[in-house]
Image (spheres, rainbow, N blue to C red):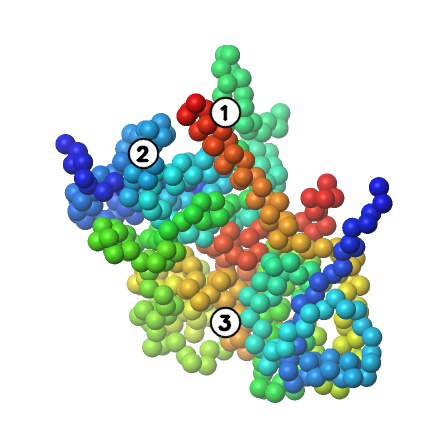
Amino acid sequence: MNMPDKPKIGFYWCASCGGCEESVVDLAEDILMVAGAVDIVFWPVAMDFKKSDVQAMEDRSILVTMINGAIRTSEQEEMARLIRRKSKLIIAYGSCAHLGGIPSLANEFERAEILKYIYDDAPSVINEERTRPQTEFRHNSRNITLPEFRNMVRTLDQVIDVDYYLPGCPPTPKLLKQAVLTLLSGELPPKGTVLSPDTALCEECPRKDSKPTDLSFTHFTRPHMILFDNTKCMLAQGLVCMGPATRAGCEAVCINGNMPCSGCFGPTSRVRDQGAKILSSICSNMHSNTEEKIDLVLDEIPDPVGTFYRYGLAASLLRKKIVEGQLEDDK
Amino acid sequence: MHNIEKKWEPKIIAFFCNWCTYTAADLAGVSRLKYAPNVRVIRIMCSGRVDPQFIMQALASGADGVLIGGCHPGDCHYSEGNYKMLRRFRLLQRVFKSMGIDEKRCRLEWISASEGDKVKTVINDMVEQIQKLGPLALPERMADLDKEIEEIEKEISKEEVVEHA
């Protein structure tokens, strides 16, 4: 039986891998607590609700909807806007909704390049007629439609108004539980808050004490290239660890798994562009002083954008790769 | 039709170190050297103070280029701020390359306090190069891209009108 006065809550996914949905289930026994305290009125991955069910709801009748995934298609925009109207609060759940996530690394490529690779050039593809997905298609006198694939990947807050952010790839069950409890308590944090501690990951890193005060990189390496000390600061071993430029709150899960931080929690509130900040920090601490030597050491970071902006290219200052000289007016 | 619109002129943001390039720019002024008026100078205490975010923010806000002036190697007032800038610059150029931004849009120069003449030649040269490249126009480019997401809003409001009718 539905208790009429239980707060309503929804979950939705856009351009995401499903890991965020998984993390909701990772609440384990606590999910019973959540399910007991709220009515889940919309959750396509787990329950059978349709778009029409959401359309039939009254505006602002859902207390909070957690939307995960970046925004790449017109359908995702449409659903995000519909859910925004039906919800009092929207939480951008996980790195993709928060900052663009891994899908937004596609902003390093033009739309046409992406479609060409996927539908022509990928080794597993045979497409002699060079077919491309169309947004409309007539079949047996019925109109079949597909969403539009946009020119770039966007964060959720570049498309709709967002109230809170739960960072992480995915957010930890602990942070989700805290967020739900906070919302149910009615004591809401200021709008725009990222629901995770506002300090750098190094602050809660178990290897903090082994971080040298005078870091001096003579070279960089990557986890698959060396056998490294599983007690010592990653940076001290020449590994590019995003810890100094990344928000705390995950309790250093990757470090505890002996992998450097890759930055999924995004920057703290004092930093606008996470990639620029780690770039700055790493370069300050390099040993070389001449162009030639600096370049040799930098060659050891083969993909700077993919390393520094792994979860946040869409939210970065530059947002998307451009093609110099091609301006709208010239077309 | 006659083109009476204002001709595009490059906008360059310059970060000049207080101890060298800024003084040199002052000297250029006092010596009445003429150089292109396209540069907006921001004085900082050391080129090592230039956070890469400043450079990106400048470009993202509509600058066509960013010029950084620091002390010659070995001459930094704070011993190695200019080396920090050099390393950041080298890595930043790699990021810009991946993001499609021409390397000539960001320039690092060592100009000592006595080199007023170099301020003039560097600025004139950079303005000329950026004139050849054309506008970077990041805000306009992003606004153009974002037009595609406005359509949906219109469609949804149309549907609602139909529903309510």
Residue B135, picture quadrant: bottom right
* A284 on left or right of B63: left
Given residues A98 and B155, the one toward you in this image is: B155
The residue that label 2 is drawn on is A58
For image coordinates 82% across by 80% down, the residue present is B32
Label 3, label 1: how far apart the Cα atoms are: 48 Å
The residue that label 3 is drawn on is A281
Residue B53, picture quadrant: bottom right
Q: Amino acid under label 2?
A: Glu
What numbered label is drawn on residue B100? none
For image coordinates 70% across by 75% down, the residue present is B109
2 and 1 marks on the same chain? yes
**Which-is-in-front pick, marks 2 and 3?**
2
Q: Amino acid under label 1?
A: Thr
3 and 1 marks on the same chain? yes
* B89 on left or right of A186: right
User: Can you name the residue that lies furthest to the right here?
Assistant: B2
What numbered label is drawn on residue A145? 1
For image coordinates 30% across by 48% down, the residue present is A23
Chain letter behind tag 2: A
Element under disc 1: strand
2 and 3 marks on the same chain? yes
**Residue A238 versus residue B155 in the image, above or below:** below
Given residues B22 and A253, the one toward you in this image is: B22
Chain letter behind tag 3: A
| Residue A104, image x, y percentages | 50, 48
